[in-house]
């Protein structure tokens, strides 16, 4: 155990570099590599998290699992993720980020490999729950990397770039994995992401870096000359600082808001393909392509959110939250209640994707690190992470039950009533926006 802990421990500081030119060159090189590793790596490993959403209809049609079963299996991933985020965020503040990220991705890929062989409910629940736990290492590790390598006044736009990884992973899952499933069957919907995950883990290990001090570099705030409203404050142990964030009321409001928006986010990720197939009559590849539009818009939305909040609102997030929350709600209304026209559906997907990824950028990661000490960014992510994925897990089970209740079989053909579950999804988004808006006057801290 001592060997394991020492392997994952953050590296020691080495003798600082003295040449400014060498420091500048090293920072530019490693910042690019770190950003590429956490953005592309996290995006690609996302396919190992979302594969179940693509294979739901084949599993139902072949009688392997019912919607309620699939809701239970899906909830295990989110419960595992929530439990993992409780610990992984705390650990990420102390960990060697390169190893922390790569090992989590490697283990997640192995879980997907096992899922391709399983047709037993509780075996699948166990594997998918473990997958959630290993997936939980990714976001805190990435956020700690960003807080170490990017300073306060530039972090919003880099968070925006990193948040495109969600949309990259979702789009790749819905299109590439969807095509694999349509061609080869549901098992390959897990095996394909597993292979990709193994390759991704190796790439992240090669490109990611631990903290700047382990390379002889000064703190990024010193290098950039960026100390946002820094005030003298007494020193405290890292653990006590981690605990102190629980005394900030805005943290709890933000955590609840994030939990509610994750209900809607993962409702579309987990059940959107099934909805488009059963309620709109699209094929699996076509449904994946439609959701890809939402993901592409999400990439633009995540980047736009970072730049808008940094430049237009001087690093204040609440005004941007309101704008992107309204975009997301209008998009949902067009998708579910607008005319059944492909153009309207596409417009709804664009607005939903852009709004949702902006909110995920803020509520899931950026805003919480703004209002908490930067030395405990991982712990701050733990708080919102636990709430967010408990929300996603509860959603998965409730959605599965509501969809099952609305399912009828006539002459051997399944019919679905998605009305009740849609109201549940949209209600969560409205409540999330109200909570996020209540934090209008919340300020950043160093």
Image (spheres, rainbow, N blue to C red):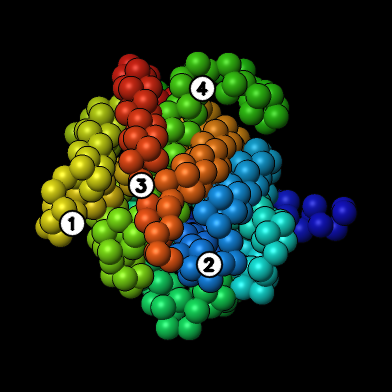
Q: Where's the N terminus, which quadrant?
A: bottom right
Say whether disc 3 or disc 1 marks the residue closer to the N-terminus: 1
Q: Secondary structure at mark 1?
A: helix
Residue at left offset 80%, top offset 54%: 6
Q: Which residue is mark 3?
A: 417
Residue at left offset 62%, top offset 73%: 116
Q: Which residue is mark 2?
A: 59
Distance between mark 4 and mark 2 Cα atoms: 38 Å
Query: In the visual, does 308 lie left or right of 55?
Result: left
Q: Which residue is mark 4?
A: 252
Name the foreground residue: 21 vs 180.
Answer: 180
Across and down, in percent, residue 444 comes to 40, 25
Q: Is residue 345 visible?
A: yes
Q: Secondary structure at mark 2?
A: helix
Name the foreground residue: 245 vs 330.
Answer: 330
Give the vertical position of 153 relative to 242 (above or below).
below
- Local packing at callout 1 (Cα closer than 10 Å; few below 14, some 14-19, many 20+) is some
Name the foreground residue: 224 vs 373.
Answer: 373
- Local packing at callout 4 (Cα closer than 10 Å; few below 14, some 14-19, many 20+) is some
Distance between mark 3 and mark 2 Cα atoms: 19 Å
Say whether disc 4 or disc 1 marks the residue closer to the N-terminus: 4
Q: Are marks 3 and 1 in contact (CB under 8 Å)?
A: no
Say whether disc 2 or disc 1 marks the residue closer to the N-terminus: 2
Distance between mark 3 and mark 1 Cα atoms: 22 Å
Across and down, in percent, residue 10 comes to 68, 50
Hey, which residue is sitting farthest right in the picture? 1
Say whether disc 4 or disc 2 marks the residue closer to the N-terminus: 2
Say whether disc 3 or disc 4 marks the residue closer to the N-terminus: 4
Q: Is residue 360 visible?
A: no
Q: Which residue is mark 1?
A: 346
């Amino acid at each position: 155990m001592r060997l394991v802990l020492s392997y994952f421990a953050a590296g020691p500081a080495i003798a600082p570099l003295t040449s400014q030119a060498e420091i500048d060159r090293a920072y530019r090189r490693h910042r690019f590599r770190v950003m590429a590793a956490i953005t592309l790596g996290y995006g690609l490993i996302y396919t190992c998290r979302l594969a179940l959403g693509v294979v739901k209809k084949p599993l139902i049609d072949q009688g392997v699992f019912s919607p309620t079963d699939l809701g239970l299996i899906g909830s295990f991933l989110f419960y595992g993720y929530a439990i993992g985020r409780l610990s992984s965020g705390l650990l990420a503040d102390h960990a060697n980020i390169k190893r922390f990220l790569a090992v989590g991705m490697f283990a997640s890929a192995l879980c997907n490999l096992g899922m391709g062989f399983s047709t037993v409910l509780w075996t699948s629940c166990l594997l998918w729950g473990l997958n959630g736990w290993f997936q939980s290492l990714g976001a805190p590790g990435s956020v700690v990397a960003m807080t170490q390598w990017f300073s306060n006044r530039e972090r919003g736009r880099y968070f925006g770039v990193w948040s495109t990884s969600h949309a990259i992973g979702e789009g790749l899952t819905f299109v590439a994995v969807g095509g694999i499933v349509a061609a080869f069957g549901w098992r390959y919907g897990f095996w394909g992401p597993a292979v990709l995950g193994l390759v991704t883990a190796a790439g992240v290990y090669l490109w990611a870096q631990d903290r700047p001090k382990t390379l002889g570099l000064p703190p990024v705030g010193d290098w950039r000359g960026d100390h946002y409203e820094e005030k003298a404050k007494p020193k405290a142990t890292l653990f006590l600082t981690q605990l102190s964030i629980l005394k900030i009321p805005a943290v709890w409001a933000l955590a609840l808001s994030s939990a509610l928006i994750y209900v809607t986010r993962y409702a579309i990720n987990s059940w959107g393909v099934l909805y488009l197939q059963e309620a709109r009559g699209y094929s699996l590849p076509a449904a994946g392509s439609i959701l890809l539009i939402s993901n592409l818009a999400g990439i633009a939305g995540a980047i736009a959110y970072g730049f808008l909040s940094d430049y237009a609102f001087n690093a204040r997030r609440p005004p941007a939250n309101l704008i992107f929350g309204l975009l997301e709600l209008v998009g949902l209304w067009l998708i579910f209640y607008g005319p059944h026209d492909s153009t309207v559906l596409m417009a709804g997907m664009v607005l939903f994707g852009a709004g949702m990824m902006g909110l995920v950028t803020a509520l899931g990661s950026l805003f919480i690190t703004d209002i908490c000490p930067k030395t405990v960014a991982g712990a701050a992510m733990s708080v919102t992470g636990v709430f967010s994925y408990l929300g996603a897990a509860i959603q998965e089970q409730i959605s599965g039950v509501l969809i099952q209740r609305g399912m009828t079989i006539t002459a051997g053909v399944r019919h679905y009533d998605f009305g009740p579950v849609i109201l549940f999804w949209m209600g969560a988004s409205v409540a999330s926006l109200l909570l996020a808006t209540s934090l209008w006057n919340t300020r950043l801290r160093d």
